[in-house]
C-alpha cells in the first residue's frame, strides 16, 4: 500500500485544488479565448489542463506530455515587483524540468492564431511524439459490408503542416 502524505500535505493539496477550481470559474477573457483552442486535444492532439497546481504554484495551462506551462499575463505583470515574483516562479519550474512560455493577455486577444502557432512550436521543440490521429475514410461498399474497414488510423504530422511565424 502506498504511503499516505501527512494530513497537512493533504490539506495543502485540497486547498490548491479548490483554489484552481475557483480560478477556472473566474477565468479572464484571454484565458477563456485560449482555452477554446487548447481544450479537448485540439492543439496537436495533446491534452492541456487549465489552472493546474504544480508544486506551490498554479499554472494557467499545462500540457503534461510536453512538460509545457503556458502563463497569461495581465497589466500587473508589467510591474517590477510582480516581474520578480514571476522570475522566481519560472526559475522554480524550469529547475524541475518544465518549460514556461508567457503571453500578454492582449496578444492572445488580438492574435490568437499566432499565439497557438507559438505554442505548437514549443511542443515541437519539446520533442514529444505526437499522438496517432484517426481519420475517417468514406467506404464505397454497400452499408453493412466491409464492417470495421471504413476507418483507417494514420499518423499525421500536425505541426509540420502548420505555418510557423
Image (tube, rainbow, N blue to C red):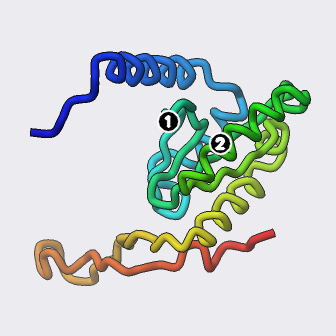
Q: Nearer the viewer, residue 40 or 73?
A: 73
Residue that numbered label 1 is attached to: 55
**Can you give x and y, in whole percent of width and height, for residue 110 in the image?**
84, 43
Is 122 situated above or below 82? below
- What residue lies at 54% left-to-right and 32% top-to-bottom? 51
Q: Secondary structure at mark 1?
A: loop
116 or 88, nearer to the observer: 88
**Quick check: marks 1 and 2 in contact, CB under 8 Å?**
no
Q: Specify which label sits upstream in the sequence, 1 or 2.
A: 2
Left or right of 110 in this view: 48: left
Residue sitting nearer the eye, 98 or 162: 98
Q: Report the disc number at residue 34.
A: 2
Q: CA distance from mark 1 to mark 2?
A: 23 Å
- Residue furthest to the left: 1
**What percent of the width, then of the height, locates residue 147?**
12, 76
Name the residue at 64% across, 46% down: 70
Horizontal placement of 25 versus 113: left or right?
Answer: left
Residue at left offset 67%, top offset 73%: 162
Q: Residues within 10 Å of mark 2 (few under 14, many from 20)?
A: some
Quadrant for the C terminus in the image: bottom right
Please name whichever residue, 160 or 140, is drawn nearer the observer in this view of the structure.
Answer: 160
Quadrant showing the N terminus = top left
Against 136, residue 42 (above or below) is: above
Amino acid at each position: 500500500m502506498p504511503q499516505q502524505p501527512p494530513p497537512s500535505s493533504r490539506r495543502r493539496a485540497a486547498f490548491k485544488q479548490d483554489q484552481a477550481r475557483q480560478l477556472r470559474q473566474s477565468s479572464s477573457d484571454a484565458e477563456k479565448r485560449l482555452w477554446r483552442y487548447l481544450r479537448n486535444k485540439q492543439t496537436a492532439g495533446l491534452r492541456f489542463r487549465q489552472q493546474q497546481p504544480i508544486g506551490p504554484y498554479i499554472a494557467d495551462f499545462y500540457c503534461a506530455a510536453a512538460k509545457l506551462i503556458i502563463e497569461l499575463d495581465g497589466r500587473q505583470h508589467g510591474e517590477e515587483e510582480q516581474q520578480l515574483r514571476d522570475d522566481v516562479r519560472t526559475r522554480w519550474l524550469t529547475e524541475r524540468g518544465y518549460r514556461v512560455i508567457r503571453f500578454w493577455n492582449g496578444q492572445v486577444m488580438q492574435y490568437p492564431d499566432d499565439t497557438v502557432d507559438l505554442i505548437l512550436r514549443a511542443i515541437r521543440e519539446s520533442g514529444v511524439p505526437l499522438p496517432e490521429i484517426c481519420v475517417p475514410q468514406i467506404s464505397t461498399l454497400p452499408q453493412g459490408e466491409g464492417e470495421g474497414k471504413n476507418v483507417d488510423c494514420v499518423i499525421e504530422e500536425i505541426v509540420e503542416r502548420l505555418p510557423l511565424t
